[in-house]
Image (spheres, helix red, strand yellow):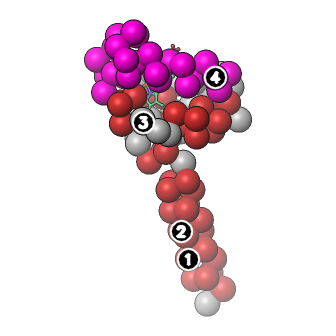
Amino acid sequence: MKKILLVAATVALSIGSVQANPYMALGCAGCHGGAGQGASAPALAGKDASWIVQQLKDFQSGARKNATMNAMAGMAAGQEQAIADFLASK
Ligand code: HEC
């Protein structure tokens, strides 16, 4: 019984953190790594939050061009700061 409760609590916790964390929810981790450590795409962990927000805005406006990121940054609209804070804390 204790084990079942523990599993239920762990599942609830991980669902909660996905919702609270647009970086994970939007699939950014698939290319940039679960902790922003970099994978097929550049590392973002520990970057200055304001710099990350600016890159996302530049991808959105087209001032910075990359087909993948122009699309991904559009999906992140309104959540730039939450994403940047998450990555800056890594
Ligand atoms: C399909 C793969 C992929 C996904 C998914 C993806 N990215 Fe990227 N991202 C890239 C690539 C490739 C680059 C490098 C673009 C370039 O060379 O300009 C990049 C660049 C970036 C940069 C600039 C990094 C630098 O060093 O200049 C930021 C910030 C960023 N991505 C954030 C995100 C966020 C936030 C998400 C989720 C909303 C996301 N990315 C999802 C592939 C991806």
Residue 46 % position (x, y): 68, 25
Find out whether residue 49 is within the magenta segment.
yes
Q: Does the residue labelled 3 lie within 8 Å of ligand 1?
A: yes
The answer to which quarter of the image holds residue 53 is top right
Q: Please tell me which of labels 3 and 4 falls first in the chain.
A: 4
Q: Residue 50 carries which label?
A: 4
Which secondary structure class fits the magenta region best?
Answer: helix
Mark 2 burial class by Cα count in 10 Å: few <14, some 14-19, many 20+: few
Amino acid tagged 3? Ala
Q: Which residue corresponds to mark 3? A: 76
Amino acid tagged 2? Val
Mark 2 vs mark 3: in front: 3
Q: Which residue corresponds to mark 1? A: 8
Disc 3 to disc 1: CB gap under 8 Å: no
Q: Quadrant of the C terminus?
A: top right
Mark 3 burial class by Cα count in 10 Å: few <14, some 14-19, many 20+: many
